[in-house]
Image (spheres, rainbow, N blue to C red):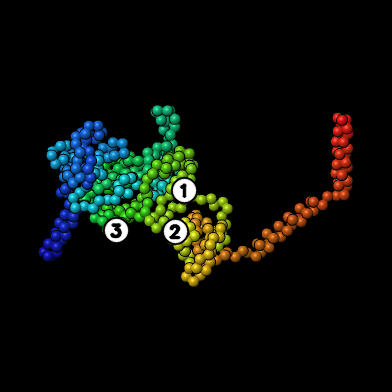
Amino acid sequence: MKKILVISMFFFIWFNCIIFTFAEDIYYANRSDILYRSHSAIQVIREIRQGEQLTILEGGITYAFTGDIERIKVQAEDGSIGWIAVDAVSISDSELLPVEITDSSWINSYYLDVLKNLRRENLFTYEPFWRDHYYNYRYINSMDGEERSWYQDIPGMSGFSFHNIYTKVYEFGEANYFDLINGKITRLNNEYLYSFFCTSTQINFEESYLKRIFSINEKGFIKISIDGDYLDVYINNLKMFTLIKNNSEIIKQFKELLGRNTCDLSSITWPRRADGTMDYPPPIDMSSYRPTHRVTENIRLRDYSNTSSLIVTTLQKDTEVHVIETGTSSTINNINAPWVLIISSTGFTGWCFSGYLEEIAVNNSAADAIADTAKNSIVSKEEAKALPFWVWIVIGAGVVVGVVVILILKKLKS
């Protein structure tokens, strides 16, 4: 029993040492940057040299926005105190997050599904409290005296911003947020693992999903896995979020959709995984779709008619597709067949190898019925053309009279 207690205490101390290593982390400038007198970046104190040791002030991570740059308050090696860009600060002996992660904010990927369907109520699938708590809510805006609805009350999207020394998790355009102090970052291929400590929070909406995941003073681990335009986020080894890189066009069209329940998606560049696949297909016109073929084996749908182009998605066996164009032929796995441009029943479009497609048989009785209908239609048109003889006499007489009238008018003019 004593041995078990000793072993348990050892693992408890070891685990807590890992979690709390960031409490004693040494910070430094990972690049040269300007130290300002205040977070508004008005008065320069001096330039901070790359590699210079820094001390984070005011109880850990504090920051303020100056335009698009977040700054934190630090003390430099010479004792000068000021504000520096947060991304210029790192932890000693820690990996750096790549700039493609730190240079932008990341939003939940489900917003693409809301946009793709061109229906704002589709947001209820992912954020049901708008339906359950606010759908019938109305209020009069004090500024313009107009009545507001639930969709006009949404402050913004939910997501993450990542930095080398802290992570911000936010909801509804930062109406709710949690600030997490990062520990040392470890990299394994395209994955980054670090401990966190939840240092501050703000909750303005009680229907916060984040409250189920984080709480003030909580400790744990985050793993982020970058895959093209996507980030998969794991909290304590559980996958909790799939994110996409935010951009102004997605924000613009999302606001349009909320306001008008429609928007223009043609200007959006839709995100892809590293291999080119898409979690959400861009909207396409399915009005002319009719299944002409069926997939016999799982096959890849690509941007172009060759095996070196990016993969759009994998079409599963028995997926129905509409072939709209035939391209050049190739031999794959000893099968010679043309590449075809298709629209799938799942809403994707692209090129696939037709060697693994089979034509969908047309029901003969239905085909015969269609043929009979077409034949009857043709007969009726021919019958309609067969005018009675007396009608032709009237038409001929009319032509003769018309010619005579024209000749008389010409003679009178001369």
Between tags 3 and 2, which lies in front?
Answer: 2
**Can you see residue 137?**
no
Q: Residues within 10 Å of mark 3 (few under 14, many from 20)?
A: few
Separation of marks 3 and 2 at Cα, in angstroms: 24 Å
Q: Amino acid at mark 3?
A: Asn
In the rendered structure, which disc, 3 or 1, sits on the residue that comes first in sequence?
1
Between 324 and 136, the residue placed more toward the observer is 324
- Position of 37 with respect to 332 (left or right) is left
CB contact under 8 Å: marks 2 and 1: no
Please name the residue that numbered disc 2 is placed on: 309
Q: Which mark is residue 116?
A: 1
The answer to which image quadrant residue 177 occupies is top left
Amino acid residing under circle 2: Ser
Q: CA distance from mark 3 to mark 1?
A: 32 Å
Front-most of 354 and 402? 402
Query: Does 210 appear above or below 344?
Result: above
Between 104 and 42, the one nearer to me in the picture = 42
Q: Of the numbered discs in the image, which one, if any, rests on residue 248?
A: none
For marks 2 and 1, give the CA distance.
24 Å
Q: Which mark is residue 189?
A: 3
For residue 406, which quarter of the picture?
top right
> Which residue is at a point 19% across and 34% down the rendered structure image?
45
Q: Position of residue 405 (x, y in %)?
A: 87, 35
- The amino acid type, in three-letter code, at marker 1 is Lys
Q: Is residue 274 left or right of residue 362?
A: left
